[in-house]
Image: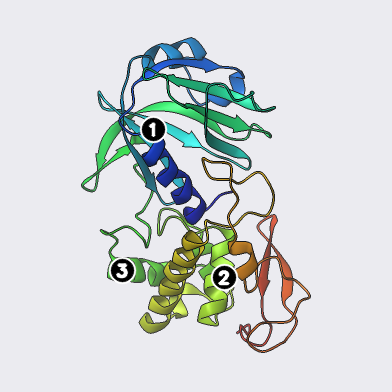
Amino acid sequence: MPELPEVEVVRLGLERHVEGRSIASVDVLHPRAIRRHVPGADDFSARLAGVTVTAARRRGKYLWLELAGGEAMLAHLGMSGQMLVQPASAPDEKHLRVRFRFADGGPELRFVDQRTFGGLALDELVDAGGAALPAALAHIARDPMDPAFDLDAAVAALRRRRTEVKRALLDQTLVSGIGNIYADEALWRARLHGTRPTERLTRARALEVLGAASDVMTDALAAGGTSFDALYVNVDGRSGYFERSLNVYGRGGEPCRRCASLIRREAFMNRSSYSCPRCQRRR
């Protein structure tokens, strides 16, 4: 699932190509794409017709378009969702689910989703800690790249949790934006094993791991995000290249770039977790 850097790359593209434009019509081509919008496809299309997109927003790994009138179109990218900006003359993608045409007659916005785990929905904007968020995201914490992120508060909250540090990093109500890939990368940079109890972290170590998470996501953003296959692309259809810079994630059995020990892969919450047995010793 896309994490903060990948979603931010998509948001920046939407900001360039969609912000300020008025939606002329919306075609829902697959009902699962708007299953989270309970009133259904006709309501979704009718409420968006004639509405202007005022901003492209993100919190953590959650993305939405802010609309004139106080609503938001929340986009769940899931495992394979793509927001593509295409000329109206371009052929339809095989897995095109929703098409947005604009009043200016310019390029369309297309929601493409091969596995149909993602989807779109309309939601009201509410005040959440001084920021306007879709109501469904009001519980999501700020992320380390948010200018209003309170690092001291996040460190204190992290140390209060009685859990493992990797599980805490993945808790979007504590710190948002960090997923499985960047949690592993941050823990490697901080030389911490993911099973370290959070209540045993010193303040300095908690600061270090959150700082590492911020740094690795900043580096990933500069590389356009991490693309393991053709399912993650930006709005122009291009892949990111941070995969080439990953130090542990996906490198099981390969030598650690710091100490040459073989990277270890372990099962974790129905996923995989990667770490260096020497740099990140269990305690």
Q: Position of residue 141 (x, y in %)?
A: 36, 53
Give amino acid for label 1.
Val
Circles 3, 1 touching at the beta carbon (< 8 Å): no
Q: Can you say whether 253 is above or below 227 in the image?
A: below
Q: Position of residue 189 (x, y in %)?
A: 53, 78
Q: Can you say whether 111 is above or below 41 in the image?
A: below
Please tell me how crowded label 2 is: few (under 14), some (14-19), or many (20+) other residues with Cα within 10 Å: many
- Judge from the rendering whether residue 57 lies leftward or rightward of residue 27; answer left or right: left
Quadrant of the rendered image containing residue 89: top right
How far is disc 1 from disc 2 in space, using C-alphas? 33 Å
Q: Position of residue 208 (x, y in %)?
A: 42, 79
Q: How many marks?
A: 3
Q: What colour scheme governs how the chains and residues are painted in the rendered image of this protein? A: rainbow
Closest to the observer: 159 or 30?
30
Q: Can you say whether 145 is above or below 199 in the image?
A: above
- Residue beneath disc 3: 151
- Residue beneath disc 2: 185
Q: Can you say whether 277 is above or below 127 in the image?
A: below
Quadrant of the rendered image containing residue 11: top left
Residue found at x 58% / y 42%: 237
Q: Which secondary structure lies at badge 1? A: loop
Res 173 seen here = yes
Quadrant location of the C terminus in the rendered image: bottom right
Viewer-nearest of labels 3 and 1? 1
